[in-house]
Image (spheres, helix red, strand yellow):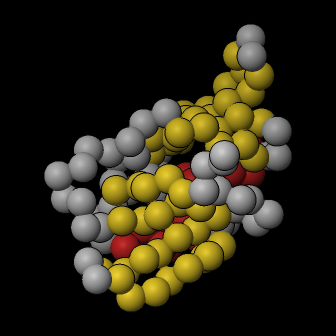
């Protein structure tokens, strides 16, 4: 068994698409009509797990604590800040370097250096 898709609640799929493919550098995996809107997934290059940017769950609270890995946290922090996103870090912790940020919809992420 493996995790194939994680649902990320968003209120606007176009804004989400611009954020996840822009400063985060992910690619579109699927963008298809769906009975409840649009089935829009993104993933990092070479990644096997996709993020479903779902706008049809208005009652779904933002997620928190999803952990990503990036090779250069300083570069990522710069891209996030250039896009107007508040990023905390990178900071050094006993378990390694990390960066914290929220997407435009309040979903919280931790990015570890990898």
Q: Hey, which residue is sitting farthest top in the picture?
A: 94
Q: Is residue 114 visible?
A: yes
| Number of numbered discs visible in the structure rendering | 0
Q: Hey, which residue is sitting farthest bottom in the picture?
A: 33
- Looking at the image, which residue is at 80% across and 46% down? 72
Q: Is residue 104 above or below residue 22?
A: above
Is residue 44 rendered to the left or right of residue 108?
right
Is residue 96 rendered to the left or right of residue 106?
right
Front residue of this view, candidates 79 and 97: 97
Q: Is residue 79 visible?
A: no
Front residue of this view, candidates 33 and 24: 33
- Residue 67: quadrant of the picture: top right
Q: Position of residue 41 (x, y in %)?
A: 52, 70
The quarter of the image holding the C terminus is top right
- Looking at the image, which residue is at 19% across and 59% down? 58
Q: Position of residue 4 (x, y in %)?
A: 60, 56
- Looking at the image, which residue is at 74% across and 11% down? 94
């Amino acid at each position: 068994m493996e995790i194939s898709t994680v649902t990320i609640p968003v209120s606007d799929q176009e804004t989400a698409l611009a954020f996840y493919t822009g400063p985060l550098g992910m690619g579109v995996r699927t963008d298809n009509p769906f009975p409840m809107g649009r089935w829009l997934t993104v993933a990092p290059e070479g990644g096997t797990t996709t993020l479903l940017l779902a706008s049809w769950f208005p009652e779904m609270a933002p997620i928190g604590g999803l952990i990503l890995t990036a090779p250069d946290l300083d570069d990522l922090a710069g891209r996030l800040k250039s896009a107007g996103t508040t990023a905390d870090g990178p900071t050094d912790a006993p378990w390694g370097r990390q960066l914290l940020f929220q997407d435009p919809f309040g979903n919280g992420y931790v990015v570890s250096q990898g």
